[in-house]
Amino acid sequence: MENDAKVIPIQSAPYHLSRQAGEAENMLDHIVDDFPDNPQSMAYFYDLFRRVYCHGDEVKHEGMLVGTTCIQAPEELIYAFGATPMRLCNGSYHYDQKGADFMPAKSCSLVKATLGMLNSDNVIPRIGKPDLVVNPTTCDQKKKSSVMIEDMGYAVYDLEFPNVKESEASRVYWQRSVRQFTARLRELTGKKLTRKNLQAAMAKTSRAQAAFRKLHNFRRKSPSLILGKDAFLVTNAYFFDDIERWTDAVEKLNEELAQRDQSGFKAVQSKAPRVLFTGSPPIFPNLKLPLLIEEAGGVVVTDETCSANRMLYDMTAVDEWMVNDMVDSLADKYLKPCTCPIFTRNDDRRRRLLDLVKDFNADGVVYQAFAGCQVYEMEYRSVAEEFNKAGIPMLYIETDYSLDDKGQLSTRIEAFLESLKNRKKHRA
Ligand code: SF4
Ligand code: SF4
């Protein structure tokens, strides 16, 4: 007898029901719904993350797509060749677990999540397959990722990055490396680098940076006009949003902050402890620590991380507007001011941290180190000594993308903020 049972094809679940959509949605709901007085102009960013991360909407781009795995890849060059840069560093616990299937257990969450995302069928942000992945040879985990990314079927370019930044030899080495990167982009796009195109690309990023700096300066105000969770969301959007649209939205937010300032608006209580955030970068949806700080009544007023301040603050100083000089000036911008702890020495990072505490009138510092990130873990000691000497309290937290330690971290953060409040009271 003929078996007439029908084979029902397995339908993959719609994206919005997936684990990564749920993870993003929980985080976004928390950011939006659990805090009063969100700036109205943040609606652009809430909606952007909702569409891209929760609904899986496609992120459109112009020309070829060049994925970058670190802020050290000069994005102005990518724009100048008519391509679009997209930062691939990922903050999802879902992808962190995907990465853990094939990476050593002690790898940092950021690297595991980035590779887990690249190795997934369901890549979010939905960007399409990058025509090239540029992997600056910074920390060991990033370096060793190149071959793994290549094995997944991507074209990978190792952008050679020096370990020392003070010497003239490293400067020359890096400038040569950036010129070689230019040659690779020419080969990829079939286009020529012209002064006009590079100038236009630099104008694009300068405008974005100017908008960021204005936002950064508004965060000096005490009491704060905006919470750190929103500021991190804004800078995280820079990873994948259209740069012009992003800049327009930040300018609009700045106008609203100017109005808030004029009207004497307070986003937090006057006594809220002001926190400088540093260390491994908060990347959506992993905004766990900034949110725990602000839920407990503190406010993140500034940061020294590569998902915000370090990514957008430093501008290019050009002496000669000739194409080769412009490329060298760009190279300088990506090396000299960089305060990532991957360098052998990092006096600049300690200096910058002290300056930020002073300029933003911070009461204390929270230092996040992703478990497995040796450079942040090792550099912690010298940073702690510096803060200790200056009498600035610091809380060191080793964590990852999972939410398992949330309860324990929240207790430590509350106790830290309480001690900052008491200190403030005694000083007053
Ligand atoms: S921590 Fe340093 S090496 Fe890692 S992505 Fe950020 S800037 Fe690059
Ligand atoms: S957090 Fe540490 S290990 Fe991870 S990418 Fe950054 S420097 Fe490398």
Image (tube, rainbow, N blue to C red):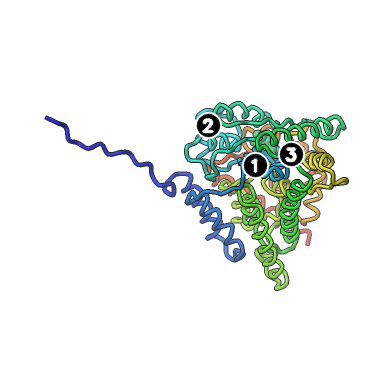
- Residue 94's spot in the image, x, y percent? 50, 40
Residue 405 in percent (x, y) is at 55, 42
Mark 1 close to ligand 2, CB under 8 Å: no
The amino acid marked with disc number 2 is: Ala
> In this rendering, would 380 be left or right of 153?
right
182, 292: nearer the viewer: 182
Q: Residues within 10 Å of mark 2 (few under 14, many from 20)?
A: some
Disc 1 residue crowd, few under 14, some 14–19, many 20+, Cα 10 Å:
some
Q: Which residue has dot 2 on it?
A: 100
Residue lying farthest to the left in this orientation: 1
Determine whether label 3 and label 1 are within 8 Å by CB.
Answer: no
Name the quarter where the C terminus is drawn: bottom right
Residue occupied by mark 1:
397
Work out whether 412 lies above or below 259. above
User: Mark 3 — residue?
Assistant: 340
Q: Earlier in the sequence, mark 1 or mark 2?
A: 2
Indicate the secondary structure of the residue bearing disc 3. loop
Residue at figure coordinates x 27%, y 39% from the top left: 8
The image's mark for residue 84 is none
Query: Given this view, does label 1 or label 2 mark the residue nearer the observer?
Result: 2
Label 3, residues with CA under 10 Å away: few <14, some 14-19, many ≥20:
many
Badge 1 amino acid: Ile
Q: The residue tagged with tag 1: helix, strand or loop?
A: strand
View extreme (bottom): residue: 263
* Disc 3 within 8 angstroms of ligand 1 (CB): yes
Q: Residue at x 64, y 55 (%)?
A: 246
The answer to whether 173 is drawn above or below residue 47 in the figure is above
Q: Disc 3 residue type?
A: Cys
Foreground mark, 3 or 1, reads 3
Point 51% across, 36% down: residue: 97
Query: Gap between marks 3 and 1, in whole Å?
Result: 18 Å
